[in-house]
Image: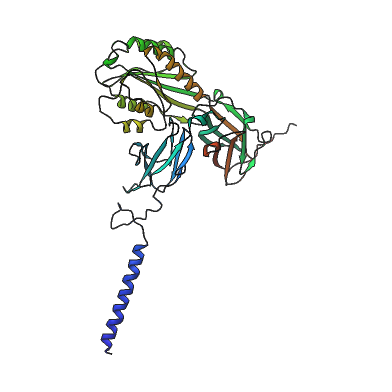
Amino acid sequence: MNKNKLGGIILTKLQLGLAIVILLLIGSCSFDKNASPSAPVLTNNLIPQSPSPANNSTEELLVVNLKWESAADKFDVYFDRKNPPNILIAKDTTAKKLLLTGLQYDTKYYWKVVAKTISGSEVEGPVWNFTTIAKNISQLNGYAFVNYDVTTMPPNTVKILFQVIDLSGKGITNLTESDFEVYEDGEPISISESELNIKKREQIPYNIYTVLMLDNSTSLKDSIETVRMSVHSLINNLLKNQLVSIYSFSESQYKLQDFTSDTTVLLNALNNYQLGFSTTDLYGSVIKGASLWKDSYQRDSISQGCMVIFTDGKDTQGSHTLAEALNSISNKIVFTVGVGSELNPEVLTRIGTGGFFRAADLNDLEKEFIDIQNKVLNYANSFYLLTYQSPKRGNKEHTLYIKIKNNNYSGESSTLIATYNSNDFSSKAIVLNK
């Protein structure tokens, strides 16, 4: 055979083999569909995964901490009772968790996470779902943990701030040290040897910021005085360290009084609660009110807010959407109070993360406001601070487990799991008397 012809055949086979190898390599890779063609990016580690609650789980609490895993930089979270979920409840959050309150009994919820990178790439995760507990289960003696912060202090002190609620989301206020079991790396912590103690909320500096957002649209023209007097009852029963701000709203939001604990100032400010305009910016008022405070949970102080919204109707202005309103109150406590036949109970229930209170008529408003104040008190008193002296030493990670004895609830939130590092831990210096 001609040498040139033979060489050509060999070259052709080499080229064919090389082409097959390239095709196999391309077929085995996964690329971000939004990435630049010149810089393909693998997306397997960006796709949101490992959801909590687990997909298709049941008997979840009315307070749920959504969690997921992803290597992305920030996230959008969608949550709804419909599939696919279209309501954006958190935008560009950098945390891989989101606390939801005010869920409904025996309801199936759908949620998804869209992962984003600094470069502008987006990866949409799968739709997950969970179902909340049936109403009769709330009668069980069950408890769950929410909101905690773990810190360490020299020489070897570990502090954990946490909250305990029942299965309906009501704060539990009467637990003592003997009601808890605490484990460090799987071993029980001795109360006496570790100097373990648990303080109640009353022993922790705590400020409660409360926004009163009061509808004054023209549909209330004959009821302004009744509403004003009903709010008097809440102000006259302020909690210790509670600061209140008052706004009225119809066409827009008008500040009657900034945050203060002075009841005289607040009552005088209510005199400026007068009739407004024939349009109701309910969703804009939710957004405005939610912007007025920021919750902070630290071992030595707690700053927590809530909003009480009163209305006799629904959003008629259309300047903002329900999705925008829900996004603004993510992880915040909101109580909605409604009266009248023009309400949209489903919307007020969704906005009312702490509860929706429907008054039979205006004369029942005072009772509803007092009930809300009692709920705020229970929620505030359900915080605990656990402190102990750890025997661990060295630059190592350790895991804490806190459980409540005789707890009938065994779901994920029935155990508080936290980690800390014992770097720089040492023993206390002992001074001998001469």
Give how far across and how far down residue 228 sits, in percent.
36, 11
Looking at this view, is 144 or 200 the one in front? 144
Looking at this view, is 277 or 243 the one in front? 277
Q: Which quadrant is the C terminus positioned in? A: top right
Say whether residue 261 is visible. Answer: no
Give how far across and how far down residue 412 sits, in percent.
52, 39
Give how far across and how far down residue 181 sits, in percent.
62, 35
Q: Which of the 4 quarters of the picture holds residue 223?
A: top left
Position of residue 424 in the picture relative to residue 135 (left or right): right
Q: Residue furthest right?
A: 434
Position of residue 323 in the picture relative to residue 405 (left or right): left
Position of residue 343 in the picture relative to residue 298 (left or right): left
Say if 195 sits above or below 235 in the image: below
Q: Which quadrant is the N terminus positioned in? A: bottom left
Give how far across and how far down residue 100 sits, in percent.
43, 34
Say whether residue 257 is visible. Answer: yes
